[in-house]
Image (cartoon, coloured by chain):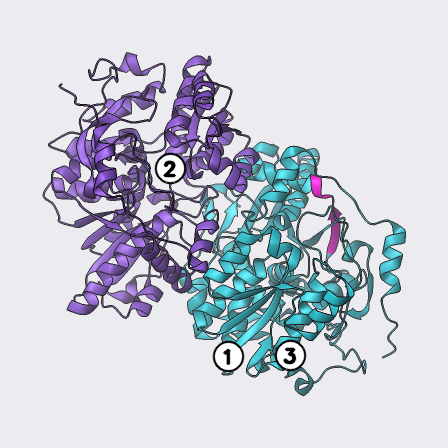
Chain colours: A purple, B cyan
Amino acid sequence: MSKMDVPYKIYLDESEIPSTWYNVRADMKNKPAPLIHPGTHKPLTFEEMRPIFCDELIKQELDNETRDVPIPEAIQNFYRMYRPSPLIHAEFLEKALDTPAKIFYKFEGSNTSGSHKLNSAIAQAYYAKEQGLKGVTTETGAGQWGTALSMASAFFGIDCKVFMVKVSYEQKPFRREVMRTYGASVTPSPSMDTEIGKKINEDNPGTTGSLGCAISEAVEVATKTEGYRYVLGSVLNQVVLHQSVIGMETMTACKKYDIKPDIVIGCAGGGSNLGGLISPFVGEKLRGEADYRIIAVEPASCPSLTRGKFAYDYADLGMVCPMAKMYTLGHGFIPSANHAGGLRYHGMSPVLSQLYHDGLMEAVSVEQTSVFEAATLFARTEGILPAPESGHAIRAAIDEALKCKESGEEKTIVFGLTGTGYFDMKAYEQFNDGTMTDRMPTDEELEKGFAGIPEIDL
Amino acid sequence: MSKMDVPYKIYLDESEIPSTWYNVRADMKNKPAPLIHPGTHKPLTFEEMRPIFCDELIKQELDNETRDVPIPEAIQNFYRMYRPSPLIHAEFLEKALDTPAKIFYKFEGSNTSGSHKLNSAIAQAYYAKEQGLKGVTTETGAGQWGTALSMASAFFGIDCKVFMVKVSYEQKPFRREVMRTYGASVTPSPSMDTEIGKKINEDNPGTTGSLGCAISEAVEVATKTEGYRYVLGSVLNQVVLHQSVIGMETMTACKKYDIKPDIVIGCAGGGSNLGGLISPFVGEKLRGEADYRIIAVEPASCPSLTRGKFAYDYADLGMVCPMAKMYTLGHGFIPSANHAGGLRYHGMSPVLSQLYHDGLMEAVSVEQTSVFEAATLFARTEGILPAPESGHAIRAAIDEALKCKESGEEKTIVFGLTGTGYFDMKAYEQFNDGTMTDRMPTDEELEKGFAGIPEIDL
């Protein structure tokens, strides 16, 4: 790689935005296990999913064969509003680390939703509109997905009802206002608008909610309201498919500038960003065309890959959603209260779980104080203030770069910078004040979570 | 202009970042009036300014002759971290307005400081470092300038002391934390750290501060602390010079894609963004090479150009700073309490004031509810959630585009989108809730402000 040829920021032309998504499942020998019905434990059919999900999205969910899925023109047009996203050569960070490694990051935060979530939100809103639906429902915790879906729904002129975990609704009023500015209705969850919300409020007076509860409310409203469907921003196969646009652009930029990644790194919560970033790289591995080390980075406080079990589990606390075979800490697992960032889902995308199980991907877990230390160094050298989630990938990238410093190796590291931290300053405040602490689950806590995983005999 | 040739987002190459700033004063027949000493009323000399400002910046402040000022390499390198900024064809907004006008906007919000302020902050931090200084002091109200200066100071490894208007410090804790994350010290103003702060606190128990008071504190610390100087993010000639990078990139992009602006629009508070955006366009007007309508947009609640007086006035409430000849509402003028956005400075850049006085620029004022209406439409169509300041330019651009719709004219409008509104959601909340109101100053209030303008006999 001739450094002189690579600009600091690589912006592809608009014509280089992919016109198809890449479906990594088509190249997987071991396909991800199908979603199953929480009652019958049988693989869910198209017809069974129709009351919950949009038709076209179900087709994408079930399709393990089509390798290149055309991106509709309207979605391509929207992508032009904020894509291609830049692949940035982190030369200022390299200098600060004094490492021979070459570090690049794909920055997905240059849009108002502030993260990569928009890549799938716009697709899901589009298919809802095409189906003639009135609106969509969803849940949001930290708020990135809800914001992205609000933007996407506003663009296509459909309604968007967001159930926001009550504690976030109260602590993140600005996130809520961004969604309202885009015309979404935002309801704190548990609410008194749904049967399940009423029940949870009655059973747990004063509860501040959970993601699992918000999911159940959103699903209830979608299935009970004419012309509505439920949409989800992570975990599902369709989401990994839409997010492949990240990896495809990254690969195009690498090939254009003769950058040869040795290591590809991404943070992993439900797997939406990581799945999208690595899809084409894993594809080359699966087809025997190239080899890469691929590293998933998760928080030590919610270590589904590094300490979880590979099993069928419920996707939500309410156990109303389809079940997925994935690395899971148990659907009742909740990270310790001191956990500041996102990446707090108990499970992991079935696609990524299968890849990890098959040895195509590594995983590491990192403590949050070391994450914010890395994020702060990154902000001060590269300018961008990262989301805590993205800080996990930064931490791992820095660790690999420091290993190169020791060994003298000139490895090329590419990582995904999923978004910006403007709405996460409360966590940065804790770090700045020195009051942030680390706390990984004890073995006993993990066992308690595992105990909730049902034994499924397929 | 062939629409097919213009991409939605125009990203210039890094090689097209200008290597010189353009000093519009060199082409002005009537130069802006010099800064004068608040005591003697005589033009300030280099030596008189040295205790307050950095040497090289004073030279830039006083230099009305050098047209092209070389940008030091270290600043050019930093610019590559977030520049060239995109010039975006607002085709989705055009469609929503159903206008034959072509609308383009230069987006300066794609960096962590969230605004154009970084263009000058990095220059000022660089010159402070070059002079061997330990650090810089400044004030910040809304927080954009303080954030930008914190980033820039972190990059060059100098200290940054920010006096933040107390009411902002308390109401915008996230802005404060961004600055702290970049290593700045942030002090609520008035503080007990300065003589003037103590005096103001004693005289006005419980005061929540003002920009004028924060300026005085920052200047006091700079002049009393070995190795420190004071820096300012707007109004000054040097700031307009640094911000010319906005206009130069805009002009390069226009010429490259054969876009011929009829109207150039920018919001105007102290004039940093507007001055930078229009500099090269005004230059062509001054040299008789081209003609453009140039429109400054200000809030109806702080209408320095449209309702102010062109006179020498104090730059700060404490009357310790140099005096400038400018359009002013009087240094004691404070916008009505219901004013939500920025753009609340009582005066205007001397460069812009002179251009306006000489008829080279128009000015309009707009009410804030109409600004947020425009900002919301913009967010929903173009995706980007604008800062309230930027919303003023959007309002005027939409109004011009709607005039084109009526007349059928296919005018080309270019406006400056200075930044993002992530830290301004409180104001959006007021608008979303329908509780935002408008209030322009009465004639009596203006007279009271004018009464504070001293009569200067030069």
| Above-or-below relation of A367 to B372 | below
Question: x, y (%) of residue A8?
Answer: 35, 61
CA gap between label 2 and label 1 equals 45 Å
Part of the protein shown in magenta: B362-369
Q: Which residue is mark 2?
A: A119
Residue B92 seen in this snapshot: no
Quadrant containing the N terminus of chain A is bottom left
The one of B259 and B61 positioned closer to us in this rendering? B61
Q: Quadrant of residue B208?
A: bottom right
- Residue B24 location (% of width, % of height): 64, 69
Q: CA distance from mark 1 to mark 3?
A: 26 Å
Residue B425 appears left or right of A358: right
Please state which amino acid type lies under the numbered disc 2: Asn
Q: Are marks 3 and 2 on the same chain?
A: no
Looking at the image, the residue that sits furthest to the bottom is B47
Mark 3: which amino acid? Answer: Asp
**CB of mark 3 within 8 Å of CB of mark 2?**
no
In this rendering, would A251 be left or right of B261? Answer: left
- Asked whether disc 2 touches disc 1, contact meaning CB atoms under 8 Å apart, the reply is no
Q: Which residue in the protein does label 1 denote?
A: B134
Q: Is residue B178 left or right of residue A246?
A: right
Residue in view at x 77 percent, y 60 percent: B359
Q: Amino acid at mark 1?
A: Lys
Q: Chain of mark 2?
A: A
Corner quadrant of residue A143: top left
Residue identified by numbered label 3: B63
> Does the stretch in magenta take in A107?
no
- Left or right: where does residue B83 sit relative to residue A233? right
